[in-house]
Image (tube, grey):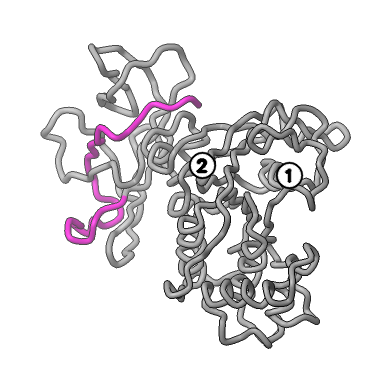
């Protein structure tokens, strides 16, 4: 647990990161492709995407471990593109924590301070304070091999924060923890970041981590930003089928035709029509419908309902999730709150209505 009796006293220098047209190639393979973005001072910014999308490469360019082939990086107004990593005033938390196995918790955390020639008194004060803050004040003499995964993760976080970096960089730091501990450590990291007002850049492939921790998220796809938005914006207003599917696993439904009607679109799918807010033009659109934005009905009396057949039902406690087949053979997943679940059996003919939160997205 975090101990509020030991507040952080980190220096909060301005730390805005600007990335301008950065490209990184390895041979004929382009990992990062003319990517530009700006991370604001004090924000928790997440680079999200599947393995191989370029997120770790981009983080390591910011850290100074990789030099881009094109473009430049700035810390506030200072060009750091070719600046050595140890001069960038960044703290890094690695996926495997990278702790020294032969050093105690205290000495692991103190390492960066000793390199920077802090006095013994300063080191004792700073290390003691940060260890208390991350809930490890009682374990300074332990070695990494004597700690749990969550405790090692806290040591790595303390080591990165104790040097008072202007930017905190984290490369999938929760991936080696079990599910319950991951949730706990999300709260620890976010609380420390908010209290210290430090700029943080977090890499993950886990959409739940990204949504729960971030101020903004850059969803990466093959070295480019597919969508940059707040967690709420990315979930509620995906711009592409890639974003809709990666965040929240939306149903992506083939659109047969579109017709503009005032400030909405009439969308033809399977054997019926529904209305979606907003007006779009052109081709290559799909309907993105999240499982909780579709309602199952026993009859099709109301207009705008689409016929379907139940394939199976899975009971998950607070909800039931259904797989249904539309008349054109497409399958959808639908979530029903437990209190509203009629427990439809496989083979049941039902009808579906779609909420206004459903959106048209680029295929």
Can you say whether 147 is above or below 355 in the image? Answer: below
Image-based side of 187 in relation to 156, left or right: left
Image-based side of 169 in relation to 99, left or right: left
Q: Residue furthest left?
A: 301
Image-based side of 358 in relation to 84, left or right: left
The label number, if any, that marks residue 57 in the structure image: 1
The label number, if any, that marks residue 360 in the structure image: none
Which quadrant holds residue 280?
top left
Span of residues in magenta: 335-363
Q: Earlier in the sequence, mark 2 or mark 1?
A: 1
**Helix, strand or loop at mark 2:** strand
Q: Residue 243 lies in magenta, yes or no?
A: no
Residue 258 locus on image (x, y percent): 35, 16
Residue 12 locus on image (x, y percent): 55, 51
User: Which residue sits at x=44%, y=22%?
Assistant: 285
The label number, if any, that marks residue 217 in the structure image: 2
User: Which residue sits at x=57%, y=43%?
Assistant: 14
User: Which residue sits at x=16%, y=36%?
Assistant: 300
């Amino acid at each position: 647990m975090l101990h509020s009796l030991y507040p952080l006293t980190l220096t909060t220098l301005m730390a805005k990161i600007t990335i301008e047209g950065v490209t990184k190639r390895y041979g004929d393979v382009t990992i990062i492709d003319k990517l530009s973005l700006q991370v604001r001072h004090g924000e928790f910014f997440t680079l999200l995407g599947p393995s191989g999308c370029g997120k770790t490469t981009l983080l390591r360019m910011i850290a100074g471990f990789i030099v881009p082939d094109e473009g430049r990086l700035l810390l506030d107004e200072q060009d750091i593109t070719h600046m050595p990593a140890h001069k960038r005033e960044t703290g890094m938390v690695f996926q495997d924590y990278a702790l020294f196995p032969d050093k105690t918790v205290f000495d692991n955390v103190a390492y960066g301070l000793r390199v920077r020639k802090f006095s013994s008194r300063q080191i004792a004060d700073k290390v003691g304070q940060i260890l208390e803050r991350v809930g490890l004040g009682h374990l300074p003499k332990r070695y990494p091999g004597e700690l749990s995964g969550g405790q090692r993760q806290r040591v790595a976080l303390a080591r990165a924060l104790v040097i008072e970096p202007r930017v905190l960089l984290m490369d999938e730091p929760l991936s080696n923890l079990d599910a319950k501990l991951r949730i706990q450590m999300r709260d620890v990291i976010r609380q420390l970041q908010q209290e210290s007002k430090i700029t943080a850049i977090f890499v993950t492939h886990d959409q739940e981590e990204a949504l729960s921790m971030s101020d903004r998220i850059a969803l990466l796809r093959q070295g480019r930003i597919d969508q940059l938005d707040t967690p709420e914006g990315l979930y509620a207003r995906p711009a592409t089928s890639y974003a809709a599917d990666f965040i929240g696993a939306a149903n992506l439904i083939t659109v047969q035709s579109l017709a503009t009607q005032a400030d909405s679109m009439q969308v033809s799918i399977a054997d019926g029509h529904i209305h979606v807010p907003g007006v779009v033009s052109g081709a290559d659109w799909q309907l993105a419908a999240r499982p909780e934005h579709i309602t199952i009905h026993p009859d099709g009396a109301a207009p705008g309902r689409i016929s379907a057949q139940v394939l199976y039902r899975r009971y998950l406690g607070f909800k039931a999730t259904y797989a249904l087949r539309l008349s054109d053979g497409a399958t959808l997943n639908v979530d029903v709150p437990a209190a509203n679940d009629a427990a439809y059996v496989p083979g049941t003919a039902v009808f579906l209505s779609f909420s206004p939160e459903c959106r048209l997205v680029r295929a």
